[in-house]
Image (tube, helix red, strand yellow):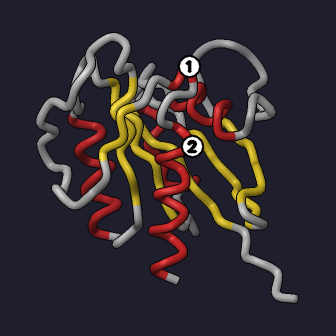
Amino acid sequence: MTQKKDTKIVIFGSYNSGKTTTLENICEKKAKVEYKGTTVALDYGNTVINGEKVHIFGTPGQERFEFMREILSNGLNGAILVIDNSKGITSAEEVILENLINRNIPYVVFANKQDLNPGFPEFEGINKEVPVIPTVALKGKGINEGLNLLLDMINNEA
């Protein structure tokens, strides 16, 4: 019997885009989030999907924590970029996208807060072949579909 590998996924996005809420939904509210408020270090959770242990790290959104995002992105297998759909893509998210593309990291984009701004605005810098998933993290809508799509992308690349 072959044991499946552990997978590391990092959730990126700007301040208040819904990264922590996304992680909590993926890990079925079992994530280690110590307090309600702004993430200043990291969020962490894990779950098992189809026998595969998935470690998920949420990054702080403020630009001053760029060094933490760099540390957390070491050894990642895939990424979720959470964009606040009511605000559109930020310059910080454009930098994250460029980094993921340059490193050839599989990623999906969660166009979060669809309850505030439904639809798909044109996101500059996002490759048309990259899946953009409409999500409402507060209600868990679209989260599992997006995660399963990302895991398929990661496993097809392996």
Residue 118: name its quadrant.
top left
Q: Nearer the viewer, residue 68 or 83?
A: 83
Q: Is residue 129 above or below residue 56?
A: below
Question: In this rendering, is residue 132 above or below 134?
Answer: below
- Residue 102 sits in quarter: bottom left
Check disc 2 and report the residue beneath it.
Answer: 144
The residue lying at 27 percent from left, 57 percent from top is 130
Identify which residue is drawn at 70% across, 55% down: 55
Marks 1 and 2, how far apart in space? 12 Å
Q: Earlier in the sequence, mark 1 or mark 2?
A: 1
Q: Which residue is at the far right?
A: 1
**Front-most of residues 50 and 123:** 50
Q: Amino acid at mark 2?
A: Asn
The label number, if any, that marks residue 139 in the structure image: 1
Dot 1, crowdedness within 10 Å: few (<14), some or many (≥20)?
Answer: few
Residue type at mark 1 is Lys
Mark 2 Cα shell of 10 Å, populated few (<14), some (14-19), many (≥20): some
Element at badge 1? helix
